[in-house]
Image (cartoon, rainbow, N blue to C red):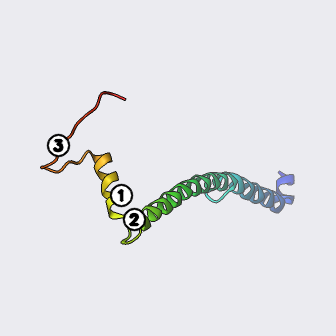
Amino acid sequence: MLFLKRNFVSLLVILALSLFGVQTYVGEHGLQARSALNARIAGLNKKLQLLLEKRFELERMTKLMAPGAVDRDMLEFQARERLNFVYKNERIYVNGAP
C-alpha cells in the first residue's frame, strides 16, 4: 500500500500514456484507420483514372461527330452497315456466307 501512495502520480502517467498509445494504434484516427484510408484512396484513384480515360474517349468521339469533321456520306455508310439500316425503296441482295 505504501508503494501505491508514493508512486500514484507515476502510475497515473503510465496509465495515461498506455491509453494514448493504444488509441494511436487502434483509435478512430489511428494507424489502422490510416492504412484503411490509404487503401480506399488507392481504389478511388484507380476508379478516377478509368473514368478519366472514358471521358477522354467520349470527348474524342464527340469531336469526330462535329459538323465538318466527318464526310456525311461516309458516316451514313458506316451507320447503315453497323445498324443494318435500309430505306423502304431499297433491295438487298445477300451473297453466300463469306
Mark 1 vs mark 2, CA separation in Å:
8 Å
Mark 2 belongs to which amino acid? Val
> Residue 16 at x, y = what percent?
74, 59
Report whether 36 appears left or right of 68. Answer: right
> Residue 59 at x, y = what percent?
45, 65
Image quadrant containing the C terminus: top left
Q: Earlier in the sequence, mark 1 or mark 3?
A: 1
Report whether 33 appears left or right of 55. Answer: right
Seen in the picture, residue 4 relative to 72 is either above or below; the reply is above
Mark 2 neighbour class, 10 Å CA radius: few under 14, some 14 to 19, many 20 or more: few
Q: Residue at x 16, y 47 (%)?
A: 90
Q: Secondary structure at mark 2?
A: loop
Residue that carries the numbered disc 2 in the rendered image = 70
Q: Which mark is residue 27?
A: none
Number of marks in the image?
3
Residue that carries the numbered disc 1 in the rendered image = 74
Q: Earlier in the sequence, mark 2 or mark 3?
A: 2
Mark 2 vs mark 3, CA separation in Å:
27 Å
Q: Which mark is residue 91?
A: 3
Residue at the bottom extreme, as displayed:
67
Give the quadrant of residue 67: bottom left
Mark 3 belongs to which amino acid? Arg
The answer to whether the residues at label 1 and label 2 have Cβ atoms under 8 Å apart is yes
Q: Residue at x 82, y 54 (%)?
A: 4
Q: Secondary structure at mark 3?
A: loop
Report whether 53 appears left or right of 32. Answer: left
